[in-house]
Amino acid sequence: MNRYCFQLQVKPDHIEAYKAAHAAVWPDMLEALADSGWHNYSLFLRPDGLLIGYVESDDLGAAQRAMAATEVNARWQRAMAEHFVDLDVPPDEGFISLTEVFNLEDQLAAVRQHGAQTNI
């Protein structure tokens, strides 16, 4: 399972509406995400509107294409589009991918497999 992280910017005057929408995501949207290969999916929102998303998937591109083929995703993206700064594509296509630079479990596994090394 691969880990993916991304960012978007929510308009400051839309933060409360965005939070409200995500407090009760449509059940058919939740099912579509799970069925499309989105796992351990979380969104984190800073008070200034910086949105960080985290998701695990075998292949995020394939998961996005599977979601794009659903009717519920089209409705959800239309409903969410107004909340974001400077997007001319649906939100699920406009996020900026972030590069993972550290993962505790990966490094621990490597150390345990190859023996501890000290960098002192």
Image: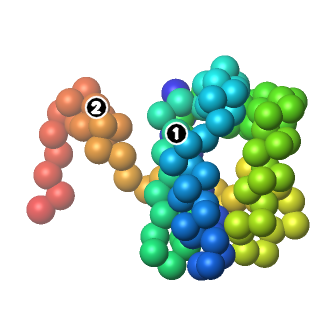
- The residue carrying mark 1 is 41
Instruction: Count how many numbered circles sit on residues in the image.
Output: 2
Residue drawn at x 53%, y 35% is 56
Residue drawn at x 83%, y 52% is 78
Q: Nearer the viewer, residue 6 or 76?
A: 76
Residue drawn at x 70%, y 59% is 95
- Give x and y (percent) for residue 81: 78, 60
Give the quadrant of the C terminus.
Answer: bottom left
Q: Nearer the viewer, residue 101 or 20?
A: 20
Residue drawn at x 30%, y 37% is 105
Mark 2 Cα shell of 10 Å, populated few (<14), some (14-19), many (≥20):
few
Q: Is residue 59 visible?
A: no
In the rendered structure, find residue 10 and report the number of the disc placed on it: none
SS at badge 1: strand
Does residue 109 appear to the left or right of 102 in the view shown? left
Rendered position, 5 above or below 57: below
Mark closer to the chain start, 2 or 1: 1
- The residue carrying mark 2 is 109
Rendered position, 72 above or below 15: above
- Give x and y (percent) for residue 28: 69, 27
Mark 1 Cα shell of 10 Å, populated few (<14), some (14-19), many (≥20):
some
Rendered position, 120 above or below 74: below
Q: Point out the frontmost of discs 2 and 1.
A: 1
Does residue 78 appear to the left or right of 6 in the view shown? right
SS at badge 2: helix
Question: Which image quarter: residue 76?
Answer: top right
The answer to whether mark 2 and mark 1 are in CB contact below 8 A is no
Q: Amino acid at mark 1?
A: Tyr
Q: Label 2 vs label 1: CA separation?
A: 23 Å
Q: Is residue 102 visible?
A: yes
Does residue 7 appear to the left or right of 62 in the view shown? left
